[in-house]
Amino acid sequence: MNLRLKRYPPDPDGIFGVLYDEDGVEVCETLEHTFDGKPALPPGVYTCARGEHRLKNLVPFITFEVTGVEGHSGILFHCGNYNAGSHGCILVGDDILMQTGTPYMITGSRIAFRRFMELQADLDHFILTVE
């Protein structure tokens, strides 16, 4: 299923957003790291390809990589809660937790990632529109 990522304005704790399906139904919340206030993934239309990847923990897992991003590679969808865990990737979660005095974060990441992968279970690729 093709997806659309709508982002909120950049924040010191990253760029939060919402991932929507083709019918405009919310799939999950998102969080991306910023580089000088900008995301690694600029607005545009991208092909996301299924494949096996590894993060720093070196445990392989299946996810989707956003391809065709000028100047960047390895932009993945994966679990994570805080801006520092993104490194330019798209973290997925169920909710944005905003508490005064602590960094904003997304919660329910493992559940949201499982749901995201189940939604795309029969696909080798999909189109992502980033606003």
Image: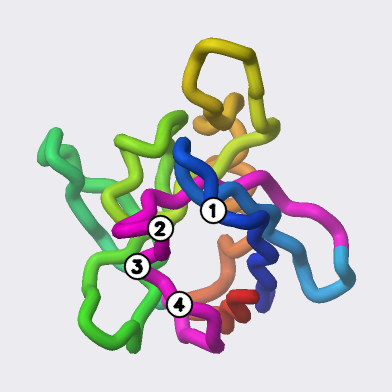
Which is more foreground, mark 4 or mark 2?
A: 2
Helix, strand or loop at label 3? It is: loop
Residue receiving disc 3: 40
Q: Is residue 48 above or below residue 63?
A: below
The residues bearing labels 2 and 3 have C-alpha atoms spaced at a distance of 10 Å
| Local crowd size for mark 2, using a 10 Å CA cut-off: few (<14), some (14–19), many (≥20) | few
Residue receiving disc 1: 10
Residue receiving disc 2: 37
| Local crowd size for mark 1, using a 10 Å CA cut-off: few (<14), some (14–19), many (≥20) | some
Tell me residue 124's x, y (percent).
Answer: 46, 77
Tell me residue 89's x, y (percent).
Answer: 36, 56
Disc with the residue nearer the chain's start (4 vs 2) = 2
| Local crowd size for mark 4, using a 10 Å CA cut-off: few (<14), some (14–19), many (≥20) | few
Helix, strand or loop at label 1? It is: loop
Point out which mark residue 119 bears: none
Q: Colour scheme in the image?
A: rainbow
Tell me residue 29's x, y (percent).
Answer: 66, 45
Q: Amino acid at mark 3?
A: Ala
At horizontal 24% and vertical 66% (from top left) the residue drawn is 74
Q: Is residue 75 above or below residue 33?
A: below
* Residue toward you, 71 or 90: 71
Task: Tell me where the magenta segment starts and ends, as one range.
Answer: 25-48
